[in-house]
Amino acid sequence: MTQIAFQDYYPDHMAHCYGCGRLNEYGHQIKSYWDGEESVCHFQPEPFHISIPGYVYGGLLAALVDCHGTGTAAAAGYKADSRAMDTEPPLRYLTASLHIDYLKPTPLGFTLEVRGKVKEVKGRKVVIEEWVSANGIISVRAELIAVQVPDKLIHELLLD
Amino acid sequence: MTQIAFQDYYPDHMAHCYGCGRLNEYGHQIKSYWDGEESVCHFQPEPFHISIPGYVYGGLLAALVDCHGTGTAAAAGYKADSRAMDTEPPLRYLTASLHIDYLKPTPLGFTLEVRGKVKEVKGRKVVIEEWVSANGIISVRAELIAVQVPDKLIHELLLD
């Protein structure tokens, strides 16, 4: 894709996340994009990311929907303001809650597709519906509530 | 502690999980124990397990409550049957759903304590309430629904 990923708009101080930070050399560095009204992210699990042999472990799936969800929330916030993700004032989001239904085991050996859909943008809250599929079969459904936090608060946390 | 961890009772074919498998050399290898009516697990995040610098990323916290929750569910299942975890017939549990509330950022640099409490054991379903604390402060609350699956089904999945 020729679009810039949501996560590549994050400023450096927000780009160290193990799940999605481009500056975390040990992490997953996921990339999320708009695909029409939905957001999409592709991820190839490592052979050791397993629950039982041959199936992806739930913690990785949770990490993917967490980071893809906050990325989608940020993109949705800027979209609701009709402006690009690198414009001021900054919109920063953290996960307030995450609900995951593991519908069936997720097979290893496929590129996972994580999709998101904005259910609601209301004040500081964004609700994202998500699902994960492997080989075209949906194995996980999730809902994430992200909350916008002032960039000032992020900087205060960083100075703690 | 001198107790054997819940996860150390898992048979080899269930001991490869990235979150809790003793045979996954790349994984977290968490260990869960009874502490009275509650279950407890301690885990030291790595310096790179961050969301923003200085704080633990949500995906790791999800992985911890997922694996500690299924471990607690298994232990609760055997306890409800008044027998040890290495006795027959085997009880195997998978996560059906996980709900996580991130109450506040979880600071890095402390050993995390994950605690679980059995809310319900009903038929094949076990509901576990969990919370995570760092430096004595609870930052995450979660609820996990685990479902018992026949060992035969696990073996069928392994042969897929």
Image: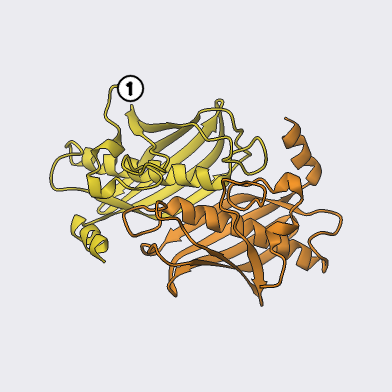
Chain colours: A orange, B yellow
Please indicate whether residue B132 sits to the left or right of residue B158 in the image: right
At x 66% / y 77%, what residue is drawn? Answer: A36
Residue B51, placed above or below residue A55:
above
Q: Which residue lies at the image location 69% right of the left edge and 57% below the top edge?
A: A7
Please give the count of numbered marks on the rendered protein.
Answer: 1
Nearer the observer, A159 or B33: A159
Say above or below: A134 vs A46. below
Q: Is mark 1 on a helix, strand or loop?
A: loop
Residue B43 image offset from top left, x and y in percent? 46, 33
Question: Hey, which quadrant is residue B153 in on the image?
Answer: bottom left
* Identity of the residue furthest to the top in this view: B2
Quarter of the figure with the N terminus of chain B: top left
The residue lying at 51 percent from left, 56 percent from top is A99
Amino acid beneath label 1:
Met
Residue at the front extreme, as displayed: A25
Judged left or right of residue A113, residue B80 is left
Neighbour tally class for label 1: few under 14, some 14-19, many 20 plus, Cα within 10 Å? few
In the rendered view, does B72 fall on the left or right side of A21? left
Q: Residue at 32%, 44% (x, y): give it.
A: B73
Q: In which quarter of the image is residue A1?
A: bottom right
Residue A96 x %, y %: 62, 49
Q: Position of residue B9 (x, y in %)?
A: 24, 38
Q: In which quarter of the image is residue B49?
A: top right
Q: Mark 1 lies on which chain?
A: B
Label 1 sits on residue: B1
B47 over A132 or under it: above or below: above
| Rendering coords of residue B85 (x, y %) | 21, 39
Q: Between residues A27 and A95, which one lies in front from this camera angle?
A: A27
The single residue placed furthest to the bottom in the displayed view is A36
| View extreme (right): residue | A88
Q: Image quadrant for the C terminus of chain B?
A: bottom left
